Image: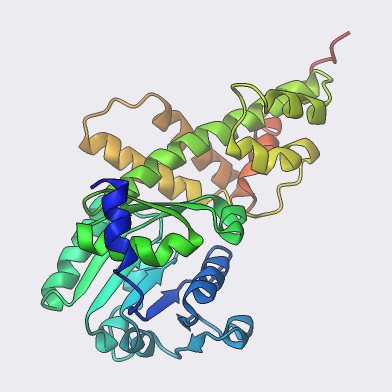
Amino acid sequence: MSDSALDSRASSASPRDVVGIVGIGSMGTPVAQHLLASRGSLVIHARSPRPELIAAGATWAATPRELAAQVDALVVLLPDLPDLESILDGPDGLLAGAGELLLMIASTSSAPEVRALAQRLSTRTNGRVRVVDCPVSGGEDGARAGRLSIMIGGDDDDAARAAAILSACGTPVHLGPLGAGEVAKACNQLVVAATILALGEATVLADRSGLDLEALWSLLAGGYAGSNVLNSRKDKLVTGDDSPSGVAKYMVKDLRFADDIAGATDTAAVLLPTLRAAFDELVESGYGDRDIAVTRRFVAERDTPGTQPASPLP
């Protein structure tokens, strides 16, 4: 579908929808704020109340069942599908309260598993619960600014509804049938993982050669080495601050999803095996809860015991 056709459908698709969100963490909170500001109402559920959202006009649902009973469309920003499946069933689960419901899965997940879940939900609810996948890219900075890239997969009409709802949070694009959004996100994470690992390694090389890191990355940002990843992580790379924003451990599952797609498409990937091994090692080394900029520290501390740093350039 063309962007103009999607815009046309989206313009009349969602004003009547009552929207909810579950998964109100570092990404979900700013997404919820944008949805609330754009729509004037929002139903929320989390492990504990969110007084700042309630004060701004959001409605609190004490259980997933109460959440589903009040909404027509639900944004899911939980870490992965098992987190969603854990709140589907039981007397207080989403399905116990759901009528006609559009489930918008913004989590980074496996495309085949999203399709399988959608089929199970359709069968169990006689088609009342429909699914689109709509993972996002842009990190916490993009979420706060309302500039997320939103990758949508699903039926045309469902995708149009999702795009209309999510347009307050960034740029939604319908990329194909259900699962297409997750394939796009896997491609995105492949590029991000390769980029942040290269940036970390290059930073170590430059630092041990005596270069001014601030000057280096300010200069290279204007050339082919420039990227949004560099722009968002330059200060962390220069200072060595890897306090968490986007934590590194999630790359392990993201790259596994990308590897699954490589297998399903008979692609003999070159980078994926190396990236998976690197991020597996990074997490095993205890850096998984640090920011992805921890690649600098990870590379720096992989030296063989007894190896001396290189001398600075003359």
Front one among 250 and 145: 145
Q: Is residue 155 visible?
A: no
Which color scheme is applied? Answer: rainbow
Looking at the rendering, which quadrant does residue 34 occupy?
bottom right
Q: How many marks do you count on the picture?
A: 0
**56 horizontally vs 268: left or right:** right
Q: Position of residue 286 (x, y in %)?
A: 62, 49
State whether residue 156 is above or below residue 87.
above
Image quarter of the C terminus: top right
> x and y percent of residue 192 in the render?
51, 38
Percent x, y for residue 84? 36, 70
Q: Is residue 186 left or right of residue 180?
A: right
Residue at the limit of the structure toward the right, as seen here: 314
Q: Is 75 rendered above or below residue 261?
A: below
Task: Using the image as rendered, state which of residue 222 and residue 241 is in the foreground.
Answer: 222
Q: Give the residue at x 67% y 28%.
A: 221
Residue 173 visible to an observer of this rendering: yes
Q: Going by the image, does 61 lie left or right of 287? A: left
What residue is at 75 percent from the left and 29 percent from the top? 218
| Of the pair 257 and 119, the residue shown nearer to us | 119
For image coordinates 55% across by 84% down, the residue present is 48
Query: Compared with residue 201, is residue 3 higher up or lower down, i.e. above or below?
Result: below
| Towards the viewer: 211 or 44 | 44
Give coordinates of residue 44: x percent, y percent.
Answer: 47, 81
Residue under the image location 52 percent in, 40 percent down:
279
Find the residue positioned furthest to the top. Answer: 314
